[in-house]
C-alpha cells in the first residue's frame, strides 16, 4: 500500500485520509486533540472521539462512528479502529487492502492509563508510527513514582499556605492527573475547560474522585488543575500564593522548569516514551515503517540500525510516495 503525506497521511491506492490537517470530504481521525482535528465533510472516528470533538468544537460536521474492534468494509478495503491508550476514545487505524495490512498508530501509549482504554497492538506489514518522543533522551519514570512526587509537591504547598497549581492539557492529562490523585486526601478544583472534558469522560465510562469547578479563582487549600494557557487568564487571578508545576513528558528536559517559569516540572505523559516506541514496532512486526511527528528522523534512523526498513514521513511540499 502506498503512503504519502500532504497536510495529513494519504493512502492514494484507496483514497483514504488519516488525521489530515486540511479539510477533506472524508477523513479518519484518531483522537480529539486539536493537532489531529479539522472539520471534515465526514469524520470517521470512535464514538468517544466523536463525542469529545463535538464537545470541544462548535462546528464539528458529520460523523461516521466506528466502535473499537469493529471491522468495517468499504469498496476495496476494510478499516478497524483499535484502542491506542493515549486519551479517552483514541484509536489506532488498521487498514486492510489487497491482502496487506497497514497500521497507523495515531498518538499512543502502551503503559496503562487510569482514564484511556488500554492499547491493543496488532501485527501489520506496513506501520506508520508517531515519533513524538522518538529520541533516547525521552525515557519516562513509572507513573506511580511521578505521582508520589506530585502528591509531595501538592502537600508541601498546602502546608505552606500556598495553592498547588498543576498545568496540564485540558483533554487527557488533566483527567489522568485527577484520577491518579484519588485517595490522597486532596480537594481538587478544575479549570472550566478541564471540568467540561471530565463530564464527557464520565459519560464515556471514566470514573473520578470528587472534583469541583474552579470558581472566582479561589482555590486556597486545594489542588488546582488548569491548562497552561490559563496561566495569564482570569482563572488564577484570585489565588494569592501559588506554587506552580508543569506536568508533561517534556519535563524530562531539565531546562523545562526554568524555560516555563514554574516551581517544578513532572514527567507524566500520555505518549509512548522512546523504549515503548521500539517495543511497539517490535510487536507490530512490520516489513516497512514510516515515522511521523516529533523526532521522526531520529527514530527512523534508530529503527534502521535495528534492521527495519524505516523512513520518516514528512516533507509535505513534495508529496513523496513510499
Ligand atoms: Zn494527542
Image (tube, grey):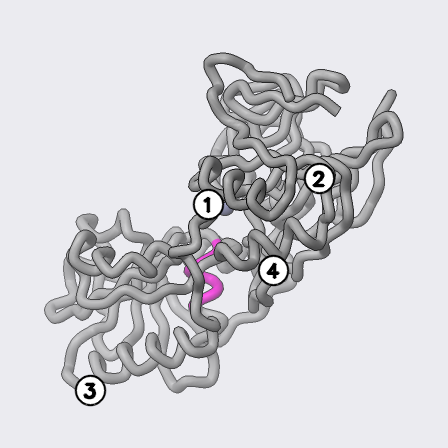
Mark 2–mark 1 Cα distance, whole angstroms, equals 17 Å
Name the spot of residue 143 as percent of width and height, x first.
47, 71
Q: Which picture quadrant has residue 279? A: bottom right
- Residue hosting label 2: 103
Label 2 residue SS: strand
Provide the residue designation for mark 4.
110
Quick check: is the Cβ at mark 1 less than 8 Å away from ligand 1? no
Which residue is disc 3 drawn over? Answer: 159
Q: Is mark 3 within 8 Å of ligand 1?
A: no
- The secondary element bearing badge 3 is classed as helix
Instruction: Tell me the residue at 58%/40% (across/down).
Output: 304
Q: Quadrant of the N terminus?
A: top right
- Residue 187: mark: none
- Say which of 259 and 285 sits in front: 285
- Classify 10 Å Cα crowding around label 3: few (below 14), some (14-19), many (20 and above): few
Alpha carbon of mark 3 to alpha carbon of mark 4: how far?
36 Å
Give the residue displayed 31% in from the left and 73% down from the top: 223
Magenta span contains residue 183: no
The residue that appears at 72% across and 42% down in the rendered structure is: 286
Magenta: main secondary structure equals: helix
Say whether residue 173 is magenta. Answer: yes
Instruction: Specify whether residue 65 is in view.
Output: no
How far apart are the two marked residues, 3 and 1, measured between alpha carbons?
37 Å
Magenta-colored span: 172-177
**How far across and how far down the image is residue 282, in percent?**
68, 53
Amino acid at each position: 500500500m502506498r503512503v504519502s503525506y500532504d497536510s495529513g497521511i494519504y493512502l492514494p491506492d484507496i483514497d483514504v485520509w488519516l488525521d489530515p490537517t486540511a479539510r477533506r470530504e472524508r477523513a479518519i481521525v484518531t483522537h480529539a486533540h486539536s493537532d489531529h482535528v479539522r472539520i471534515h465533510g465526514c469524520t470517521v472516528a470512535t464514538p468517544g472521539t466523536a463525542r469529545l470533538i463535538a464537545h470541544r468544537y462548535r462546528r464539528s460536521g458529520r460523523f461516521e462512528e466506528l466502535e473499537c474492534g469493529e471491522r468495517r468494509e468499504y469498496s476495496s478495503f476494510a478499516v478497524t479502529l483499535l484502542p491506542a491508550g493515549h486519551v479517552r476514545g483514541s484509536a489506532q487505524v488498521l487498514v486492510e487492502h489487497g491482502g496487506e495490512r497497514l497500521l497507523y498508530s495515531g498518538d499512543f501509549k502502551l503503559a496503562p492509563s487510569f482514564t484511556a482504554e488500554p492499547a491493543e497492538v496488532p501485527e501489520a506489514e506496513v506501520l506508520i508510527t508517531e515519533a513524538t518522543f522518538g529520541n533516547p533522551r525521552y525515557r519516562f519514570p513509572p507513573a506511580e513514582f511521578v505521582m508520589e512526587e506530585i502528591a509531595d509537591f501538592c502537600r508541601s504547598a498546602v502546608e505552606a499556605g500556598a495553592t498547588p497549581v498543576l498545568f496540564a492539557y485540558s483533554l487527557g492529562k488533566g483527567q489522568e492527573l485527577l484520577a491518579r490523585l484519588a485517595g490522597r486526601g486532596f480537594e481538587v478544583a478544575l479549570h472550566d475547560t478541564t471540568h467540561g472534558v471530565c463530564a464527557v469522560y464520565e459519560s464515556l465510562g471514566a470514573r473520578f474522585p470528587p472534583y469541583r469547578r474552579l470558581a472566582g479563582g479561589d482555590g486556597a487549600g486545594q489542588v488546582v488543575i488548569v491548562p497552561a494557557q490559563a496561566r495569564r487568564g482570569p482563572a488564577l487571578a484570585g489565588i494569592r500564593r501559588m506554587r506552580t508545576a508543569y506536568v508533561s513528558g517534556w519535563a524530562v528536559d531539565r531546562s523545562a522548569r526554568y524555560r516555563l517559569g514554574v516551581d517544578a516540572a513532572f514527567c507524566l505523559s500520555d505518549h509512548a516514551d522512546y523504549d515503548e516506541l521500539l517495543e511497539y514496532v517490535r510487536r507490530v512486526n512490520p516489513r516497512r515503517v514510516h515515522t511521523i511527528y516529533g523526532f521522526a528522523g531520529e527514530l527512523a534512523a534508530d529503527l534502521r540500525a535495528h534492521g527495519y526498513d524505516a523512513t520518516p514521513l514528512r516533507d509535505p511540499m513534495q508529496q513523496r510516495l513510499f
